[in-house]
Image (cartoon, helix red, strand yellow):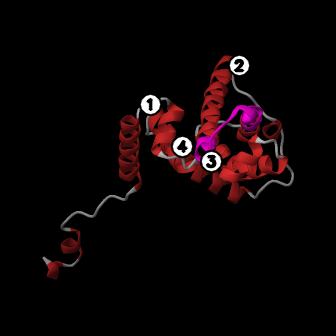
Amino acid sequence: MDDAVAAASAGDPAAFGLLWRELSPRVAAYLRSHGVADAEDVTSDVFLAVFRQMERFSGAGAAFRALVFTVAHRRQVDWHRQRTRRGTWLGLDEAGVDPVGPSAESAALGLLADEHVLAVLATLTPDQRWVLALRVVADLSLEETAAVLGKDLGAVKSLQHRALSRLRRKLSPEPYPGDALARLNPRHA
């Protein structure tokens, strides 16, 4: 990625394409994880803003990734602010019935899976969600995550630890009571 960043800084269009293909799925996933409905459009805006800055950018792949997710984080915040001011937004995809859409069963299963993930993530604080999204989805280091969020390294570590602990408690099944086997088979008592 370091070579692609250097080439993109020099104006190489193929390097821009490589950086887009490498990072855009992660940016879109980060935006979706924070409730941005039109994540692909916002991802395009993120990369347009980043590519406009490329002539002034100096650094390697890790610094470029941190820049991309800093811009993505700011665009995500702006998107939510805009939605609260303007109200709900209905895209063309949501406006009408798609005659070639997925089956009702696959749509229902997808919706249930999405709702479960969103419900579990909703138990986290916004800062915890941001840290996990940047660490897991964006694959940023602790230092890069701290820089994107404007927090110190210790705070990011603490937020990540608390978020993972909470998710572990929410996702792990309830342990069996100690006497469960004895109740099933009296010979084991």
Q: CA distance from mark 3 to mark 2?
A: 37 Å
Q: Amino acid at mark 4?
A: Leu
Where's residue 189, x and y in %?
Answer: 12, 76
Q: Find numbered disc 3 in the image and state the secondary structure of the residue it sits on.
A: helix
Residue drawn at x 51%, y 38% is 130
Which residue position holds label 3?
Answer: 61
From the viewer's perspective, tell me whether residue 175 is left or right of residue 32: left
- Report the mark closest to the observer, 4 or 1: 1
Q: Find numbered disc 1 in the image and state the secondary structure of the residue it sits on.
A: loop
Name the residue nearer the viewer: 137 or 93: 137
3 or 1: tag closer to the N-terminus: 3
Residue extending farthest left: 189
Q: Find numbered disc 4 in the image and state the secondary structure of the residue it sits on.
A: helix
Query: Mark 4 and 1 residues: CB-CB less than 8 Å, in contact?
Result: no
Which residue position holds label 4?
Answer: 134
4 or 3: tag closer to the N-terminus: 3
Q: Amino acid at mark 1?
A: Lys
Q: Is residue 64 magenta?
A: yes
- Report the mark closest to the observer, 4 or 3: 3
The relative height of residue 5 versus residue 181 in the rendered view (above or below) is above
- Stretch of the chain drawn in magenta: 47-65
Name the residue nearer the viewer: 133 or 110: 133
Q: Main secondary structure of the magenta part?
A: helix
Residue extending farthest top: 85
Q: Residues within 10 Å of mark 4 (few under 14, many from 20)?
A: many
Residue drawn at x 81%, y 53% is 101
Q: Which mark is residue 151?
A: 1
- Report the mark closest to the observer, 4 or 2: 4
